[in-house]
């Protein structure tokens, strides 16, 4: 609770600070707010408090809160000289991001469908706006509108699903619903099943799983890069946390029912994400497709429900988040220098910026899942999880897709190291350096010694 | 008077909501005007509202209606945001035709 | 006679909502939508959800629809100048919709739930009752929805105000 | 004593770090590091008791929750590969002295990094650790080949990388499966050995592993990445790939395939042998008409490795011991061959056989050393190659006579293409291009002499090497046969 | 005891090789020549010592263990030497003839820039040859076996800048390798059958086996294939004539006196095994006979002096194999010895001629050298008589011993073999007449420069001539009053000697062959001296048989079309089609397929919201359909 309060208060303070033109103070205030909430995360550890029967701050919620807050913190650090260039309204941007974060905290900790709904919508509404904050930019406009229209559309399905489940169980409370399932296992209302499926669809849309992924590449490409970073890391993580809370706990008794469609979704997602990413010329768009494919891997945790599912998602999400932040951070810097975000802009980058190139390389290796990076541990856990049920063909399919993944992640490495090109020297501001260093350290540390995070939840 | 009006089978409410929901979907599918599409989405939300209310009455549980209230709040928020996005887009493209928005692809 | 009112209003809802999506002029669409929402209000009343009926009337018809109209007028879109999608797309859309409704309802096996909707507590939809619910168990989401509205507000301002160049 | 192994594994990492930071002196630093590693390895050999036990064992808990330990140790089989790695790395570094690679500190650091990965592979007793080392060795070589390679390097190396990693991912699949089957839920190799899997399970694990190892070696028909990669890689990369890297596959078969899935080997081993034999004949025949010397040697390498693989799957002492010594010999010989070709191409900018000729006249030292290396490669008795091929053929012979006949064709075919190459490069009339050739000197000479000395010494007195691994090899074979008999 | 020092015999030449090899550019030629020859001489002296010691020793078989070489499982291969009568006598031949040829080489190679290299190679060759001879097991023998092949390669390709020489060298090596594979497989068989590769363990076991055992037969066959390669028998003989590309002393040493007889040595060594495989013996006899005749026919029309000698070598080797095939191991080995003398002599004489004529080898450009090269002429005459088989020269005894055994074995074979002997006499005298008689057919300018060779060359000629003349004494058959010392000497190794014909038959056989040889010589005399016939130029028209003979029965061409070209074609096919298109094509196909899928799939992302939503709806419908169906 105090986490959400801290974040919203910070948002409001920032909003007012904006009104009073205290531009310099915005970032520090935000960072302090986020750090305080991180402290709250740490102090609430193991307390497992429930608020009004609506929110449950268990370790699951706290862990995901922690990772999302940390991710947001990094992203805020990246705002250095990013927004300032074209807008007066940094305070509003900050506020919106913080509001979205508040929604995310709700999403990872809800105990009631209404909270899920509110959380998702707070986050989504903020993102619709954030995607469009480059008002004069067609791509940004288009991203915003597409996201909005499709998001609103998918909300309809999510709501219909919630309604049907409510109709079947007479409650929005997750525990009640779960008890209903356990208690009436033989005579579950026929409304419940389509309700589950519709919620599956709604949440699949939010996490960008195929065939509900269509918004992802366009929106990620069109939105300002920093917002894309936020969407593809923090938001995605939150989406999975929400997904997991609902399906791994509440709907777990119906696992046999929703598993086949889930596997179908997983397979399509992996295939489309990876295969389409292969041919991209635009780094940002490639990352968008890669985020789709990662959604596929993340959904593995739902294929086999085990005590570790949540933790596996946490590890994977952490690995994915920090690697992506690195990728986007470098992308921002490269784009500022070269003006576009194609792979070609990375040509010969390693010559002048060996360390930045190295960091990006590690990020790519992590995304691709090479050992000694966090990404490998994440993938490994997912495979391990699914192999536990001996879904060998699913894993084999995933492996084939992972291979395709190697190909496109290495494209940027190839461009940086092996191609001759514009020998720009990037300007790496201090905050960027900090973010890069921290992210790389986390990526490598989790890759070499993942024990710290393996039994967190 | 309401007492007398009861007795409609629940599944007829479901039918009705489903049909209106689908009409909303069809609207989204067939129209190109962003505003009309948005209106279709509103139609979908309303059908959900109706169904929720019906369930709420059927289950004799007020929380359903509270939820409808939240959906309305969302609808209001969405309309505000959505329409401002549409206005913003219109300023740039002089159109609200969604087919104009296809720079981002492939 | 009781249930026939429902069927009558339901028919109207369907007809008007169809007109919303098939009328060429967006302004007409808005107007039909208002009518549709009106029929919904009637439904709420039939279900004895008076509070919702009122809120629906005010929020949807009063606020939201006016906003729609306002934007339409602002953007000068009151003519039926929308380049229509080709017939094929429409047909495909309608077919898809039909499929959707069939599968949706089919998967619901709605016929299985044929017990009538009986109002057991006539006060269910009254303000007092709902208020207790809203400020009792649902206080947290209610409070949090303020964030939703606030962010929508900030966003709307942000997006529509002209940039100072 | 355990610390010796840790030191051996991590010293190259430290060396890599120092090398990366040492600017222009990188190559010297790298060489020193490699020589120290060699000294350590030799020290290890001296302290090694040649019996079947695993020595220098280190076992630290690493990722406790996943049952992953840093568990490594050395037995006779590992000892051979450790020796191979640590002997060849300094040679390869020294062989790279003649080149002025751009950002050479990164280059040498990557070599040392790879060394570390290789040593992990060759010593690990934990399947997960093995996999980590397996991949950790791949990344540096990918960069070495792709940054400093020829003009087609990007595409070729991408294929190499994706191909090999495809194999290793399937191996990972197999490893996870074994882990899940293991009631103790860890990756301990001993636990894997003790698993009782039915023959269907063993069959598919066999394939999951075999494909990974076959791609690495490479065995026909998984070899097509190899000629291109060898051709495009920089000299040091080719040497690393052919000299050490492909031994990972062989080692993997010996350590992880045979003892874990004996029934799988029983059911499918003949397929593996037949593929290997096809590879021998097929690659040899292809080598006949190759126009590029590097490619020719690449194909010859496929043939040689095919023989090693066949010898291993024959599952007898002679074949296995032959594989042991041949790993070492092939490493030395192929490094020598590629080095000779590198010397030529660095001077004449070509490795096309038709453009060369008569170099012997200009560079007698090179010609003689190259001849010795060629003789080692064609397994002339008295050279190291003979010991290996003889034992391998004998092993294969005991498996099946006809297979041995086909495998034996390698000694004829090998002579044909090797001498054809040697003749066309070294002998004949000096042409306009080769007239400018200068004989080897300095570090080149040192490397060539060391290689030649190794070829001859190993050929005349292979006993120490054979003794090193004999007990372990026999233990392994007993282990496999015991498991097989207990199943039947 | 001197026998225990036998390891010095190969070691000393090895040291010579190392010194000469390292000092080939720094040491003076005379020093190199001295070192090269003296090391062989020392070896020779030790060999003589060993020979004498062995003669005096009651124990005729000494194994000298040096160190463990290879061991793996049950397989133990020590590096150890076996001194017994067979190896002792081979030691004498190798070091003795080797020494003479070294001396000869000092003169012959004097002006060659690769002098040091040449001597080091020669020393190395002697080392390997001694290893071959001394090895106490098949594997050590195999080291020498392949090692001499290597030296043969090096020496044939000695003038490597000529790429056809280099090709000849390669051909020799590869053809040898074909045989070697047989040898190696034979060794594997031996190991699995007898559990060892040591002679001392194999033969006692073999002695207990019954003749006709199929394993033994297979072993014998495989070993024979090995011998075929090394000793240039059909069908692997074509490398030997090409090997004449090497310097002439090399031809004398390697391709006449020593290396090519390794096959015979090996079979003689394994005689116990071959005795158990009558079928294979029969095959050996047939192959040997065929080789003898084919090579003899080819030799009839050759014009290159060294080629004639080369084919005659092949032919003589054929006789030796014939002898082995009929069980006349002693006879065959006797012929090895005498052949070493007279063929070395003949080659060296030919070398002397070539040297005198400044590397002219075509007999059509020789003639009338009798006066100019008197020593060469006389020694060559002795050699020719010896090879033709006229008593009392050495060749007569050895050849007749083989023929006598062949006669007992099979009369038809004997007939063919004797006919071959007549051919031998004919072509050898043809060569002699063409070279030394008649008028000089070269340029006048060249004629003036012709001179007798230096002492270093003529002395070996004389020594060898003496040996060729009197070498037969070691095997004078009882029919002629001798006691066949050689067969007594070899009796510890070669137990089965085959029965000799009775004396009357033997006299008749000898008479037939001597008369036939004399007639052949007469014909040759008539044709080449009386009629002054000179072989036609290359392009002249010939009768069918002459054409076949002249073109060596087209063996090379046949091999070229049947083996080399198809292999190269297959190679190109494998590389370009199978490897690049099919195997790699499948791999690339995956990549291509994925890329194409990517190209196609990304088009779904059309940018059109309507389409996106449509796809979503399709997805939703499918999932709902699933729900409907699963309930």
Image (spheres, rainbow, N blue to C red):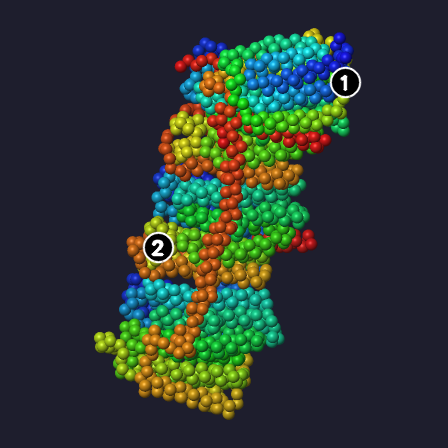
Position above or below: C75 against E628 = above
> Of residues E17 and A421, which is closer to you in this image?
A421
Q: Position of residue B50 (x, y in %)?
A: 67, 16
Left or right: E112 in relation to D302: left
Position above or below: E56 against D275 = below
In the picture of the structure, the residue carrying the numbered disc 2 is D355
Q: Residue furthest bottom?
A: E504
Position above or below: D124 against A198 = below
Q: Position of residue A36 (x, y in %)?
A: 53, 18
Q: Residue at x 52, y 85 (%)?
A: E411
Tag 1 subunit: C
> Of residues E69 and E534, which is closer to you in this image?
E534
In the picture of the structure, the residue carrying the numbered disc 1 is C116
Q: Position of residue D93 (x, y in %)?
A: 40, 46
Left or right: D457 in relation to B19: left
Q: Nearer the viewer, mark 1 or mark 2?
A: 1
Contact between marks 1 and 2 (CB within 8 A): the answer is: no
> Of residues A144 and D403, which is closer to you in this image?
A144
The C terminus of chain D lies in which quarter of the figure? bottom right
Instruction: Evaluate whether residue E115 shows in this view.
Output: yes
Q: Residue at x 47, y 24 (%)?
A: A139
Are there few (<14), some (14-19), or many (20+) residues within 10 Å of tag 2?
some
Tag 2 subunit: D
């Amino acid at each position: 609770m105090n986490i959400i309060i801290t974040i919203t208060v910070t948002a409001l303070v920032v909003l007012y600070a904006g009104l009073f033109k205290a531009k310099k103070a915005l970032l520090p205030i935000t960072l302090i707010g986020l750090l305080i909430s991180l402290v709250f995360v740490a102090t609430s550890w193991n307390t497992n408090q429930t608020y009004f029967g609506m929110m449950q701050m268990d370790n699951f919620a706290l862990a995901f809160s922690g990772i999302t807050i940390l991710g947001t913190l990094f992203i805020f650090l990246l705002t250095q000289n990013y927004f300032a260039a074209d807008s007066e309204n940094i305070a509003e941007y900050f506020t919106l991001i913080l509001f979205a974060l508040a929604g995310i905290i709700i999403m990872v900790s809800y105990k009631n469908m209404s909270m899920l709904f509110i959380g998702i919508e707070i986050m989504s509404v903020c993102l619709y706006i954030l995607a469009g904050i480059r008002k004069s930019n067609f791509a940004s406009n288009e991203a915003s509108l597409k996201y909005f229209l499709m998001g609103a559309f998918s909300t309809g399905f999510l709501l219909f699903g919630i309604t049907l489940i409510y109709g079947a169980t007479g409650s929005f409370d997750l525990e009640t619903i779960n008890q209903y399932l356990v208690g009436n296992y033989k005579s579950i209302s026929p409304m419940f099943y389509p309700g589950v499926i519709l919620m599956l669809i709604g949440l699949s849309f939010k996490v960008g799983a195929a065939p509900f992924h269509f918004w992802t590449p366009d929106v990620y490409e069109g939105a300002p890069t920093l917002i894309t970073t936020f969407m593809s890391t923090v938001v995605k993580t939150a989406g999975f946390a929400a997904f997991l809370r609902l399906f791994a706990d509440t709907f777990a008794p119906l696992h046999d029912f929703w598993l086949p469609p889930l596997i179908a979704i997983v397979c399509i997602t992996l295939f489309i994400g990876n295969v389409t990413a292969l041919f991209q010329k635009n780094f940002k768009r490639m990352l968008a497709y890669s985020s789709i494919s990662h959604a596929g891997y993340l959904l593995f945790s739902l294929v086999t429900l085990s005590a570790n599912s949540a933790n596996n998602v946490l590890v994977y999400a952490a690995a994915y988040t920090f690697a992506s932040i690195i990728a986007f951070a470098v992308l921002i810097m490269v784009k500022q220098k070269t003006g576009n975000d194609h792979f070609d802009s990375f040509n010969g980058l390693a010559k002048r910026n060996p360390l930045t190139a190295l960091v990006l390389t590690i990020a790519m290796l992590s995304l691709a899942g090479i050992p000694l990076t966090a990404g490998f541990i994440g993938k490994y856990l997912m495979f391990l999880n699914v192999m536990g049920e001996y879904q060998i063909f699913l894993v084999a399919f995933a492996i084939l897709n992972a291979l395709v993944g190697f190909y496109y992640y290495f494209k940027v490495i190839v461009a940086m190291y092996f191609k001759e090109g514009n020998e720009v020297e990037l300007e790496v501001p201090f905050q960027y350096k900090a973010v890069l260093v921290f992210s790389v350290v986390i990526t490598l540390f989790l890759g070499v010694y993942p024990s710290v995070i393996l039994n967190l939840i | 008077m309401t007492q007398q009006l009861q007795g409609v089978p629940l599944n007829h409410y479901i039918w009705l909501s489903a049909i209106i929901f689908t009409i909303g979907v069809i609207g989204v599918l067939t129209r190109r005007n962003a505003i009309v599409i948005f209106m279709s989405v509103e139609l979908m939300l309303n059908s959900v509202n109706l169904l929720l209310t019906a369930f709420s009455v059927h289950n004799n549980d007020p929380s359903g209606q509270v939820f409808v209230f939240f959906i309305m709040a969302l609808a209001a928020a969405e309309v505000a945001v959505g329409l401002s996005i549409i206005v913003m887009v219109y300023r740039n493209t002089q159109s609200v035709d969604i087919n104009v928005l296809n720079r981002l692809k492939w | 006679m009781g249930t026939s009112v429902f069927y009558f209003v339901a028919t109207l809802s369907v007809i008007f909502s169809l007109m919303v999506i098939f009328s060429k002029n967006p302004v007409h669409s808005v107007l039909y939508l208002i009518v549709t929402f009106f029929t919904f209000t009637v439904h709420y009343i039939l279900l004895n959800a008076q509070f919702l009926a009122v809120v629906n009337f005010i929020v949807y018809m009063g606020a939201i629809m006016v906003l729609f109209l306002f934007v339409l007028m602002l953007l000068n879109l009151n003519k039926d100048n929308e380049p229509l999608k080709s017939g094929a797309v429409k047909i495909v859309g309608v077919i898809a919709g039909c499929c959707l409704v069939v599968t949706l309802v089919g998967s619901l096996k709605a016929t299985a739930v044929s017990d009538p909707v009986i109002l057991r507590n006539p006060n269910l939809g009254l303000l007092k009752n709902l208020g207790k619910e809203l400020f009792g168990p649902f206080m947290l989401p209610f409070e949090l929805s303020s964030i939703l509205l606030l962010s929508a507000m900030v966003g709307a301002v942000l997006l529509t105000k002209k940039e100072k160049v | 004593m355990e610390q010796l192994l840790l030191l051996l594994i991590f010293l190259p990492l430290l060396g890599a770090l120092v090398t990366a930071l040492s600017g222009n002196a990188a190559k010297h630093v790298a060489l020193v590091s490699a020589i120290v590693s060699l000294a350590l390895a030799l020290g290890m050999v001296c302290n090694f008791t040649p019996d079947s036990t695993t020595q220098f064992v280190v076992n630290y808990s690493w990722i406790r929750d996943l049952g992953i330990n840093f568990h490594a140790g050395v037995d006779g089989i590992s000892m051979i590969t450790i020796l191979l790695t640590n002997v060849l790395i300094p040679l390869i570094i020294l062989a790279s002295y003649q080149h002025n690679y751009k950002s050479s500190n990164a280059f040498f650091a990557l070599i040392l990094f790879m060394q570390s990965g290789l040593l992990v592979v060759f010593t690990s007793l934990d399947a997960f650790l093995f996999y980590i080392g397996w991949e950790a060795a791949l990344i540096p070589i990918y960069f070495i080949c792709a940054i400093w390679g020829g003009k087609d390097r990007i595409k070729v190396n991408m294929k190499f990388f994706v191909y090999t990693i495809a194999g290793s991912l399937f191996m990972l699949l197999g490893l996870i499966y074994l882990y899940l089957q293991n009631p103790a839920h860890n990756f301990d190799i001993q636990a894997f050995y003790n698993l009782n899997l039915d023959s269907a399970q063993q069959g598919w694990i066999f394939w999951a592993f075999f494909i990974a190892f076959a791609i690495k070696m490479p065995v026909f028909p998984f070899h097509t990445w190899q000629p291109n990669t060898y051709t495009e890689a920089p000299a040091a990369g080719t040497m690393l790939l052919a000299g050490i890297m492909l031994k990972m596959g062989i080692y993997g078969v010996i350590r992880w395939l045979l003892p874990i899935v004996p029934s799988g080997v029983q059911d499918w081993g003949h397929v593996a042998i037949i593929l290997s034999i096809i590879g021998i004949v097929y690659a040899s025949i292809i080598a006949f008409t190759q126009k590029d010397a590097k490619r020719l040697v690449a194909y010859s390498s496929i043939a040689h490795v095919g023989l090693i693989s066949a010898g291993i799957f024959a599952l007898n002492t002679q074949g296995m011991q032959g594989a042991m010594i041949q790993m070492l010999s092939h490493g030395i010989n192929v490094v020598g061959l590629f080095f000779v070709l590198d010397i030529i191409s660095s001077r004449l900018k070509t490795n096309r056989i038709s453009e060369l000729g008569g170099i012997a006249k200009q560079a007698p030292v090179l010609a003689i050393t190259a001849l010795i290396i060629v003789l080692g490669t064609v397994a002339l008795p008295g050279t190291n190659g003979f010991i290996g091929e003889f034992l391998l053929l004998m092993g294969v012979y005991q498996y099946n006579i006809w297979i041995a006949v086909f495998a034996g064709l390698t000694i004829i075919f090998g002579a044909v293409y090797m001498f054809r190459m040697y003749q066309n490069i070294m002998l004949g009339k000096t042409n306009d291009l080769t007239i400018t050739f200068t004989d080897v000197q300095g570090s080149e000479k040192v490397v060539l002499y060391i290689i030649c000395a190794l070829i001859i010494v190993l050929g005349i007195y292979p006993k120490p090497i054979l003794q090193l691994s004999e007990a372990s090899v026999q233990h392994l074979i007993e282990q496999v046969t015991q498991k097989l008999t207990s199943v039947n | 005891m001197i026998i225990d020092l036998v390891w010095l015999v190969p070691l000393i030449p090895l040291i010579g090789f190392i010194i000469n090899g390292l000092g080939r550019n720094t040491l003076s030629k005379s020093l190199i020549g001295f070192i090269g020859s003296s090391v062989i001489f020392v070896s020779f002296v030790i060999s003589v010592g060993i020979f004498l010691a062995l003669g005096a020793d009651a124990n005729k078989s000494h194994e000298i263990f040096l160190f463990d070489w290879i061991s793996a499982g049950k397989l133990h291969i020590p590096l150890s030497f076996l001194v017994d009568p067979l190896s002792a006598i081979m030691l004498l031949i190798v070091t003795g003839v080797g020494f003479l040829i070294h001396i000869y080489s000092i003169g012959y190679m004097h002006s060659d820039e690769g002098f040091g290299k040449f001597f080091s190679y020669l020393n190395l060759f002697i080392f390997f040859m001694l290893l071959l001879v001394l090895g106490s097991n098949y594997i050590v023998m195999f080291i020498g076996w392949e090692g001499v092949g290597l030296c043969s390669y090096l020496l044939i390709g000695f003038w490597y800048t000529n790429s056809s020489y280099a090709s000849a060298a390669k051909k020799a090596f590869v053809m040898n390798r074909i045989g070697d594979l047989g040898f190696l497989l034979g060794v594997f068989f031996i190991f699995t059958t007898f559990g060892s590769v040591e002679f001392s363990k194999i033969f006692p076991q073999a002695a207990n086996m019954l003749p006709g055992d199929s394993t033994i037969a297979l072993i014998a066959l495989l070993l024979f294939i090995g011998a075929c390669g090394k000793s240039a028998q059909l069908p692997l003989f074509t490398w030997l004539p090409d090997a004449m590309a090497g310097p002439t002393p090399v031809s004398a040493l390697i391709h006449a006196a020593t290396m090519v007889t390794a096959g015979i040595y090996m079979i003689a060594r394994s005689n116990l095994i071959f005795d158990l495989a009558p079928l294979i013996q029969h095959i050996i006899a047939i192959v040997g006979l065929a080789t003898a005749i084919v090579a003899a026919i080819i030799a009839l029309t050759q014009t290159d002096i060294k080629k004639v000698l080369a084919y005659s070598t092949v032919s003589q080797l054929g006789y030796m194999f014939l002898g082995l095939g009929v069980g006349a191991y002693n006879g065959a080995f006797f012929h090895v010895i005498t052949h070493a003398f007279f063929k070395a002599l003949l080659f060296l004489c030919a070398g002397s001629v070539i040297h005198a004529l400044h590397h002219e080898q075509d007999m059509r450009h020789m003639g009338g050298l009798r006066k100019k090269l008197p020593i060469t002429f006389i020694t060559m005459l002795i050699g020719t008589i010896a090879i033709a088989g006229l008593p009392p020269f050495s060749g007569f005894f050895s050849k007749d011993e083989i023929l006598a055994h062949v006669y007992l074995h099979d009369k038809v074979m004997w007939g063919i073999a004797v006919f071959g002997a007549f051919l031998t006499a004919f072509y050898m005298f043809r060569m002699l007449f063409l070279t030394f008689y008649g008028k000089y057919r070269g340029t006048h300018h060249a004629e003036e420069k012709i001179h007798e060779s230096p002492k270093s060359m003529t002395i070996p000629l004389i020594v060898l001539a003496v040996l060729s003349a009197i070498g037969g004494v070691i095997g004078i058959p009882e029919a002629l009053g001798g006691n066949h010392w050689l067969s007594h000497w070899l009796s510890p190794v070669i137990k089965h000697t085959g029965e000799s014909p009775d004396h009357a038959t033997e006299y008749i056989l000898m008479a037939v062959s001597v008369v036939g040889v004399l007639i052949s010589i007469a014909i040759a005399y008539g044709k080449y001296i009386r009629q002054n016939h000179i072989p036609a130029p290359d392009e002249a028209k010939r009768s069918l048989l002459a054409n076949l003979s002249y073109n060596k029965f087209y063996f090379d061409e046949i091999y070229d079309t049947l083996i080399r070209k198809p292999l190269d074609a297959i190679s190109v096919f494998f590389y370009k089609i199978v490897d690049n298109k099919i195997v790699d094509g499948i791999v690339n196909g995956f990549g291509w397929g994925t890329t194409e899928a990517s190209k196609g799939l990304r088009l779904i992302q059309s940018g059109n919201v309507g389409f996106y939503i449509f796809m979503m709806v399709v997805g939703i419908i499918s999932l709902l359909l699933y729900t409907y169906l699963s309930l």
